[in-house]
Image (cartoon, grey):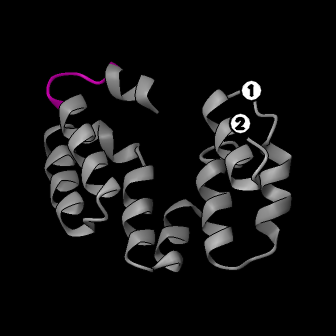
Amino acid sequence: MMDVITEMRGEAPAMAQAVIERLQGNDADEAEVLLAQMNEAYPETRDFLIFPVTIALLRGRPHDAWQLVNGLPEDRSPELKALCLKMLGDPLWHSYATAHEDSQDPFVRLAMRKLLGSA
């Protein structure tokens, strides 16, 4: 994720970092405001679903988070799909995470292993 952020143009990396800091501080409202500003200034950042998914999860709305990733192609955001399924209490999260724990994508691989407790 950080590689993608550092490749963004202009002020987008600093804005993304500010969103991350708000999320780490559990300030979903401020993160959402900053995310809207970043998306307005840099429309390509709307594809970074980790931000709105995390905001929804922080607010205790796993169904809203799932709606953001459900229907995406199978190979897109498997880490977010597994997390949402887990937060929804759906037992399929485990088999989904296991299926992706050896992903070629190091970010996905690490995320799945952490979710499974094997990292």
Q: Position of residue 82 (x, y in %)?
A: 68, 59
Q: Position of residue 39 (x, y in %)?
A: 22, 47
Residues rendered magenta in the picture: 7-11
- Front residue of 117/48: it is 117
Instruction: Tell me which numbered mark, 1 or 2, is placed earlier along the sequence.
Output: 1
Q: Inspect this view and state whether residue 91 appears.
A: yes
The disc placed on residue 104 is 1
Q: Rate crowding at label 2 as few (under 14), some (14 to 19) or many (20 or more) other CA atoms within 10 Å.
A: many
- Front residue of 35/111: it is 111
Residue position marked by numbered label 2 in the rendering: 109
Q: Which quarter of the figure is the C terminus placed in?
A: top right
Q: Is residue 17 above or below residue 31?
A: above
Decide whether the magenta segment is chiefly helix, strand or loop. loop
Amino acid tagged 1: Gln
Q: Position of residue 46 (x, y in %)?
A: 33, 47
> In the picture, residue 2 is in which quadrant?
top left
**Mark 1 touching mark 2, by CB under 8 A?**
yes
The residue at 76%/54% (across/down) is 116
Amino acid tagged 2: Arg
Q: Is residue 67 above or below residue 39?
A: below
Q: Position of residue 50 (x, y in %)?
A: 45, 51
Query: Circle 2 — which element?
Result: helix
Q: Is residue 115 above or below residue 86?
A: above
Q: Inspect this view and state whether residue 73 appears.
A: no
Query: Circle 1 — which element?
Result: loop
